[in-house]
Image: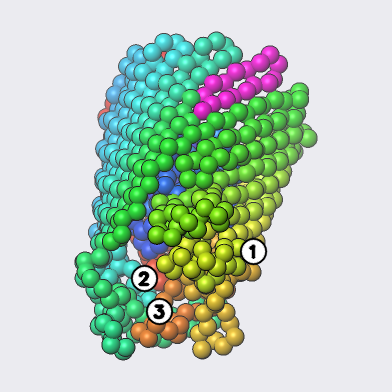
Amino acid sequence: MLDQTVLGSLNKADVFEALRLVPGVQVVQTGQRGGTTSLFVRGGNDDFNRVLIDGIPANDIGGGFDFGTLPVSSVERVEVLRNPNSVLYGADALTGVVNITTRRGTSSIPELSYAIDGGTFGTLRQDLSVGGAHQRFDYFADYSHFDTRNKVPNDAYHNGTFAGSFGWKISPSTQLVVTGRRTAADQGVPNAFDFYGIADDSSQTSRNAYVGAVLQTQTTSRWAQTVRVTSTDLQYHFVNPTPTGDAFDPFGYGPNYLGQTVTISGANGTSATGRAILDFGGTYPQTFDSRTTRRAVTAQTDYSFPRNLSVSAGVRVEDEHGSTDSGTVFTTARHNGGAFVEARDSLGERVYLAGGVGFDRNAVFGFAATPRLSLAAYLRQPTNRAVLGSTKLTFNAGTGIKAPSVFEEQSSLFRLLETSAQGPTLLSGAGVSPIGPERSRSVDVGLEQGLWHERGRIHLSLFDNRYDDLIEFVAKSALPQVGVAQAIAAATPFGAYVNSSSYRARGIELAFDSKFGRHLTLGGEYTYLDAVVTQSFASSALEPAINSAYPGVAIGAFSPLVGGRPFRRAPNSGSLHTAWVTTRGQLSLAGYFVGRADDSTFLTDGYFGNSLLLPNRDLVAGYQKVDISGAYQIHRQIRVYAVIENVLNQRYDAAPGFPALPVTVRTGVALTLGGPKGSRE
């Protein structure tokens, strides 16, 4: 768990920076502040994680979530589960769950806080919050605003976020908590500046709102109930107003627009020089819009039996509506439901067991069941009297599912046939079913060892994940290889999305955390990941591209090859964090270390050739990002702070072609009035 101690010592503007400290997690930001930010957990895809904000499902339909616009202001803690858990969380929890919790007011004296800081590249950040508690009520509200122009042209970023939490203790055993969050973000989209030498003139906006209410009651000392009602609204708009670059029309079919002449170099020793198509021909402005609304209700009951057995059971119902519009409008309306049961027991004080199963009925793919089992055994019980502390073995096994996105559903084989002229006739005897869920199977074993009178702890984990029935676009010529009849394949315009891809991800995680004295903490982690694509029928896999400069080297232009590694997941990664915290001041050092990763340039030259594609293996260079932050309380109401990021000023592209920020500095002051002289308790 990343609590206020960790978040405060890092003093970063964005939540994803703290997620870099979690074992098995890789964070990839496409470019600079505000750029699309992906979270890869134990080798899973970036849309394999269920993201909850105060228990409110925050993912887009299909699992997507951009961490790049989620500020750390108002966040109390972040919890990361690195296992599939569709039992409790339903679809999208394919590899893990990220739960973000908003702060609550606790002080009987209202606390008003204002912080302002500024720094490199015209960065200005402001945060205003108020919180407190009175009798049976508590309240907290926060508004933060962040502005920067970044270093790349047309990359200015603006983010305004409101978050609030309001609690009412109806009775000693019943409480109601209402939370809300709204983010409005605007940013220029220069595209892969290193690949084109000029910035595109595109821009994007997002307007996301999350509202939830949870009622919890303790009926008896053994029996508790929870009812949660949530609402999620996501809006995204992208516009490319005019084509950027030099018009080029070698074939007489209309111009495409080229970037400048650049030389691209890969970490694998390959390079290419030329001009890539930045904007394709067509009618401008070009736009893309998407909208997701989700209303959900969950109810859960928990009962503790005599001795050690406890059981939880619940139901969930959700109503989803989604649309995308890029010239062609796709819509979906899904009415989904599910139920689960989970039991927990212990054998004495050494062995703890938990197991459950989830049942989901999705409007697209129908019914799916997802079991899960966990075991923890203390070979040596916790003690602070010995140098060698507790020894605990852990075991987890489970499955997860993920629903298709709006575009994948509407462009699936079943839906294309259903809406075509010949479709009903073909479907009647072909046995083609609606597109199914993507699936995962995960197993991990771990060892935790306490040290130095429980002041330190070492964690070792081995995991083995399998991802099957993954959705990919398969060309009509390749559909028969998936088992689709020739007549049905021929009825599709160009091909269709089907469940035909798979890969595995195995690895080792080693982490440690320790506390020296009263003020110094030290922690770190290292992850080795062995991920391999085991099956794919996408065009890039069946017909690899060849760059004549590297004859005989197959290249996955838009997706990895079978036998290759999934893109943007480095085999080696790690982090280090140390903090010195006293009552008046603090100093923190955080380092993130990422090895080489496979990827593609995704480029097409002016003749629609492959001269700017480079071999995928180890294309992206490894990098290290080292950050320093410090703060000092010069008065009970005044705190000054400073943050230096990328202090080594390393130039790197976490995503090929998108340069990350160089060294940046932010300095600021925080003012606090009122505050914790007491609490309602």
Q: Which residue is mark 2?
A: 192
Amino acid type indicated by mark 2: Ala
Q: Which residue is mark 1?
A: 534
User: In the image, 291: left or right of 414?
Assistant: left
Residue at 38% in and 76% down? 195
Percent coordinates x, y for residue 309 in the rendering? 68, 21
- State how the image is colored: rainbow
Judging from the image, what secondary structure is the residue with disc 1 in?
strand
Is there CB contact under 8 Å for labels 2 and 3?
no
Please report the bounds of the magenta region as a residue range: 300-315
Residue 5 visible in the displayed image: no
Does the segment drawn in magenta span residue 305? yes
- Viewer-closest of 646 and 551: 551
Amino acid type indicated by mark 1: Thr
In the image, is residue 265 above or below residue 52? below
User: In the image, 410: left or right of 48?
Assistant: left
Is there CB contact under 8 Å for labels 2 and 1?
no
Marks 3 and 1 sit apart, C-alpha to C-alpha, by 27 Å
User: Of callouts 2 and 3, which one flags the residue occurring earlier in the amino acid sequence?
Assistant: 2
- Viewer-closest of 262 and 600: 600
Amino acid type indicated by mark 3: Thr
User: Of callouts 2 and 1, which one flags the residue occurring earlier in the amino acid sequence?
Assistant: 2
Q: Which residue is mark 3?
A: 604
